[in-house]
Image (cartoon, coloured by chain):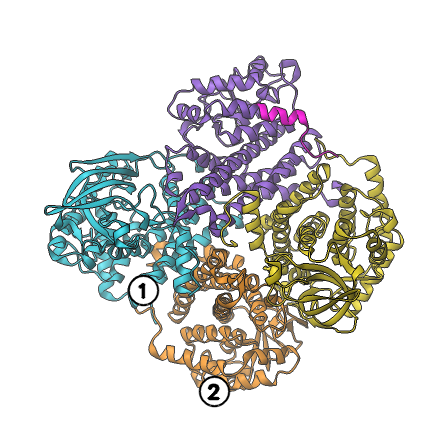
Chain colours: A cyan, B purple, C yellow, D orange
């Protein structure tokens, strides 16, 4: 058992570090949840892509470096340690792409992935509907068969990035429940352009007012067959693999939290009263949580890969609570500054962290899954 | 001993509640957030007409003299209805003006025509842009206006802020600001709990109201537990201020720690149990959610207040 | 609104304080969960009773002082502040007696209460059964009609005080569920002697080994009609009022926790590092919790009396968690001493506090009750 | 990098688990509690035969040399099976004897014939009455034997305890004792969780297994969460010790804080979800419940360990 980073990995890491040192913008980009910030972040994606740093774990033919999970972890550590911008393409890269690798066709991968890697196409997720949040199988938007494709109707909501993104992906009911016999059957996984005729996007302001998500109204939106992922009517299974990605390692890498923990420690050294053990313990808790996440990822990288299935629920509980611990501690450390709307990255990070226990399946659902599938406790009615 | 509100006090609270319920306070807060203070000023005057802002103004300036219990009660209602603006600071600053050059402002404050703000020593004043006069405890200083996480709130210290030297007056004002903020936080928490109970009773997922899930029930039961045991601390502190009791500072700190913490717990529960809708700016509940965070730390974080409790707590013999 | 203690209450309190100062044993009595300690505590009850301090809130004719709720609260504050012994008679005084006042006959009160007040008869509770803990209505011990009385059969468990007590009270099924139609119907509330023929008491060691409770086996134990409380078959309602008392103010008075908080502060001043804000905050939390409980009781005493029904569940959540906070903090403050089995009263208090979230209805059940009855959330299947 | 146990290590753990499962450890603990140490000494020797106690003894005295990962692994199993006695202290003290007058004891320690104990600076030694030699860090001192909350454990410093002067050796021993105690706590928590899951699956109330209640599920999910994220910290610390890494002390402190806290959470959950039965001395689970409390604070409370993490944490640059 060891934690030695081998020579080749060291070199890979050094290369990433060097590139980041030379390219990371000196000034923080404006928030990616604003029009100007979105454009700036898209340009940054293009810059990453130009030197093959946007999707290091992908095959080379799609713009990646075939990086192992370990190398990806090291890259992410370097990325966030360097203070590099948030990833505006993350919904595509971390949620849609793994689904395409698993369930898509070669044609789809060849057509979609390179533009995703370069930031040419930025993707939004379109999962939830007004009546279907935690209970995703309750969704009601429909896909109706038409010549050579499907017509989408209905409404999606809480679509992150949809205010400014190019395309979106989501599940649609292609067979009514009365015919399919079960709510999670008869669903089709589809991709659609956000500027297509019949699509209306209404941005929704997040807790800090920024349009971090949107409602999407669909009125007879035509989607060709080639934009169905997997088999028509079999979308649930593909969607669940996406959900696993949303909870697993890839969406929220340990590097992100290690960097935040480092910044918190710096803040503590700068502002904290060294004798204040109460605050010191809170800072330490965040540091310990980030380190635990890093080591757990190293174990995954040494073995079977990142957590999947129910294990990804445990992972999501950990990072979402860690993120809140980090940011609530920082706000308290900041004293009177802590309530201001724009204190370094802490204010926006706090607002972002507040959503963690909700998206990707609420933490209540995750605990149910952990208890039933990992511990084997008897299923109640959902919960 | 009669540690209960009397009929007159209950009636006063009910009259404020009725006034505020009819006033569309969320719209007032949104106007303030958007830079239009007129609706808030109008509502402030109507609250003044109802007697709300006279409660800390000396009688010779048109006030009732300091009535700490009524003050707490009033702030609970203001918090419950989500009133923006520097209410706690106006009350606290009201006690500092008599005998100063600015005492002529007091009748206007009592009637709700004028708004005050107050900065803690080393801190910012809440909503100085709205205030007709800003006081700052400690040294003279200046800090540019900045936006708070609460969209209807801005923080800063204007160049013409009136410095108040340390002394018993500034200590009392600090205590009053903390007491009022505790009450605002408690009221904020009460609304958040009620709204979340209402939502979880009707929102269905998996074919049943989500309020029938035990995880939801227990989380809300814990919020009620916190609020219900914070409330006696609040009124206990108000009575201690009323009686100028030796332990008043300790009682205020205990009340602020408990109410500030309970209000924030209510906000976290509201956010979690509403899901995404609670996280949107346009849904009115977000006004209370953001305010609860801010009120938690204003005039003493739970952490700071706990330390005060332990540092200043009189020995058991003295307490009896 | 005021918190002034009136002159007469001041005098009452001064009288209690003075009596306690003169009578409280200088050395802590041995644990009441041991044979020797039980006897010593019974003797203390007799001493209290001799000067009418054992049941201050009862009518004078049964040995009390007709004290109001406020006076009782003040007495309890003085009692625990004086470091007076735990009350071995508490199951009788706080659980059985209120039920007798509400549901008993005058004959029962006259016969039972004076001996309870004097410690001549010490009572054990006999609620739970092996298959009926949180789910009390599942109980299976039976009371069978016989000439002039009832024959009790079955087993009770977790009966606190039963190892050394004289008599016990509990619920027995007098009509089978098949006939009564509902599990909480057909139950009869009965009192019985622990030394009667057919009774076997098997003491059970608590977490610290002391026989704090017992199993009671009943084999055709004859109980006369006069020892039925309320109507035969209507025991559930009377039992529920007992349960309310177990959760309400009277079993666990604020004075108990105020005194413990004072002792904790003393311990902190003696052993704590004044710069250790983390520990200081934990101590302060306990102090604040005890003060909140005291003030909430003063509000009750000023108004409608102690919490009843669902409100008593909130009360129980507060004191049971407060008790744990107090004792866990003390153990941590004690450092290496904290793990020893007999550190002042803290070790035994800690072990006792651990049971708080379980007895009198688990805290899970209490939260269900609070949510359903105080907040009006929809009933699920139990929880 | 290979941050995973290898086959040999897994086999070693499995062999210890098999040995302990067959040994009726609860009976051994109860005998020790009742004053009969013979069953524990016998089991200790069998564990010695299986190689458990050689893991911190230098090779020239019949040991394997220090193998921190195997040590952690072994202690997890000892904790899981509830072994009483000063295992962590024996391991830590093993590293202190070479080159001293007592080095002749080492072969006996490695084989499980002899038991050691060790007192932290200013603290007590665990089970000195059972130990064949007791070392104490810091000054020479004496403390009478006293009973721990854990009935199979007694604390004190005998008059003939061997004082160990501060230095790198005593620091390393302190770290090892903390590492082993963290592992014991993690193992204790694993057993408590497994036993509670088993119980709640079968215990019915209100006509259903109590494990189907969401409150029960969520509490146990939280325990698993704590244990599963404490475990990598434990092995991370073991690897750091193995590599004599600069941050080893920090990693040990992090592991101790997390494992000690997780073990105690598991105990609290076990107690609550078993109800009264978990609170009885005679039910074997109580052995683990009481041990979890004691292991939480031994060789560093979570609080103390958190402070160490922050005080000693190397800067980010140094860590990479």
Q: Residue lying furthest right in this view?
A: C50
Indicate the position of residue C219 as horizontal and vertical percent values: 72, 73
In this rendering, position of residue A374 left or right of residue D273:
left
Image vertical order of residue B26 relative to residue D71, above or below: above
Image-quadrant location for residue C345: bottom right
Of tags 1 and 2, which is closer to the observer?
1
Residue D273: image tag? none
Q: Residue B229 is drawn in which quadrant? A: top right
Vertical comparison of D288 with D61: above or below:
above
Task: Tell me the quarter of the picture where residue C331 sits.
Answer: bottom right
Mark 1 neighbour class, 10 Å CA radius: few under 14, some 14 to 19, many 20 or more:
some
Q: Is residue B176 magenta?
A: no
Residue at 58% from the left image edge and 81% from the top image edge: D28
- Residue lying at the far top of the rendered structure: B104
Identify the subunit bearing mark 2.
D
Mark 2 lies on a secondary structure that is: helix
Tell which of A110 and A235 is nearer to you. A235
Please provide percent x and percent y for residue C226: 80, 59
Residue B177: image x %, image y %?
A: 57, 30
B3 in the magenta segment: yes
* x, y percent for residue D91: 50, 76
Task: Check disc 1 and report the residue beneath it.
Answer: A300
- Please identify the quadrant where the C terminus of chain B is shown: top right
Say above or below: C264 vs C28: above
* Residue neighbourhood size for the residue with mark 2, other residues' Cα within 10 Å, grouped as few (<14), some (14–19), many (≥20): some
Q: Residues in magenta?
A: B1-15
State the mark number for residue D49: 2
- Separation of residues labelled 1 and 2 (CA atoms): 34 Å
Q: Nearer the viewer, residue C178 or B291?
A: C178
Callouts 1 and 2 close, C-beta under 8 Å? no
- Residue sitting at x 17%, y 51%: A228
Residue at point 44% right, 58% down?
A380
């Amino acid at each position: 058992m060891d934690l030695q980073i081998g020579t080749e990995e060291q070199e890979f890491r050094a290369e990433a570090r060097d590139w980041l040192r030379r390219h990371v913008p000196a000034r923080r980009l404006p928030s990616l949840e604003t029009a100007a910030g979105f454009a700036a972040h898209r340009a940054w994606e293009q810059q990453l892509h130009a030197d093959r740093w946007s999707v290091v774990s992908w095959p080379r033919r799609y713009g990646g470096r075939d990086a192992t999970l370990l190398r990806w972890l090291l890259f992410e550590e370097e990325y966030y340690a360097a203070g590099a911008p948030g990833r505006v393409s993350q919904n595509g890269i971390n949620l849609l792409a793994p689904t395409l690798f698993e369930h898509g066709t070669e044609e789809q991968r060849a057509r979609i992935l390179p533009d995703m890697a370069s930031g040419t196409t930025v993707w939004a997720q379109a999962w939830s509907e007004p009546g279907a949040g935690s209970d995703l199988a309750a969704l009601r938007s429909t896909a109706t068969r038409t010549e050579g494709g499907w017509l989408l109707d209905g409404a999606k909501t809480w679509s992150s990035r949809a205010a400014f993104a190019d395309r979106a992906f989501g599940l649609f009911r292609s067979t009514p429940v009365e015919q399919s016999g079960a709510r999670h059957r008869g669903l089709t996984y589809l991709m659609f352009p956000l500027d297509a005729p019949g699509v209306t996007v209404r941005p929704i302001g997040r807790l800090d007012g920024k349009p971090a998500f949107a409602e999407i109204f669909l009125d007879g939106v035509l989607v060709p067959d080639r934009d169905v992922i997997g088999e028509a009517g079999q979308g649930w299974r593909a969607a669940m693999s996406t959900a696993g990605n949303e909870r697993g390692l890839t969406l929220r890498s340990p590097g992100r939290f290690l960097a935040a923990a480092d910044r918190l420690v710096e803040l503590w050294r700068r502002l904290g009263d060294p004798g204040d053990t109460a605050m010191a313990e809170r800072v330490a808790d965040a540091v310990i949580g980030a380190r635990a996440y890093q080591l757990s990822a190293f174990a995954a990288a040494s073995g079977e890969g990142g957590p999947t299935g129910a294990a990804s629920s445990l992972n999501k509980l950990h990072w979402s609570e860690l993120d809140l611990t980090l940011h609530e501690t920082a706000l308290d450390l900041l004293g009177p500054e802590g309530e201001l709307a724009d204190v370094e990255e802490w204010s926006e990070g706090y607002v972002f962290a507040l959503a963690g226990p909700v998206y990707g399946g609420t933490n209540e659902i995750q605990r149910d899954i952990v208890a039933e599938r990992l511990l084997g406790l008897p299923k109640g009615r959902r919960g | 001993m009669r540690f209960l509100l009397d009929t007159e006090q209950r009636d006063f609270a009910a009259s404020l509640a009725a006034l505020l319920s009819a006033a569309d306070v969320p719209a007032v807060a949104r106007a303030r957030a958007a830079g239009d203070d007129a609706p808030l000023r109008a509502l402030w005057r109507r609250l003044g007409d109802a007697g709300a802002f006279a409660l800390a103004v000396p009688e010779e300036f048109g006030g009732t003299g300091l009535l700490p219990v009524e003050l707490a009660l009033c702030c609970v209602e203001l918090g419950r209805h989500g009133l923006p603006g520097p209410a706690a600071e106006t009350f606290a600053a009201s006690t500092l003006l008599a005998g100063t050059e600015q005492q002529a402002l007091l009748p206007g404050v009592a009637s709700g025509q004028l708004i005050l703000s107050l900065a803690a020593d080393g801190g910012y004043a809440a909503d100085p842009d709205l205030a007709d006069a800003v006081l700052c405890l400690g040294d003279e200083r200046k800090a540019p206006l900045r936006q708070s996480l609460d969209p209807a709130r801005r923080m800063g210290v204007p160049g013409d802020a009136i410095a108040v030297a340390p002394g018993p007056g500034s200590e009392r004002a600090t205590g009053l600001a903390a007491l009022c903020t505790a009450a605002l936080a408690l009221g904020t928490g009460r609304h958040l709990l009620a709204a979340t109970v209402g939502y979880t009773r009707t929102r269905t997922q998996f074919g049943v109201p989500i309020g029938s899930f035990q995880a939801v029930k227990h989380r809300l039961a814990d919020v009620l537990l916190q609020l219900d045991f914070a409330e006696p601390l609040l009124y206990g502190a108000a009575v201690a201020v009323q009686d100028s009791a030796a332990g008043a500072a300790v009682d205020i700190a205990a009340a602020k720690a408990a109410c500030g913490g309970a209000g924030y717990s209510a906000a976290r529960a509201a956010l979690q149990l509403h899901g995404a809708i609670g996280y949107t700016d346009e849904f009115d509940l977000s006004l209370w959610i953001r305010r609860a965070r801010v009120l938690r730390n204003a005039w003493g974080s739970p952490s700071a207040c706990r330390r005060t409790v332990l540092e200043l707590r009189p020995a058991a013999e003295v307490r009896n």
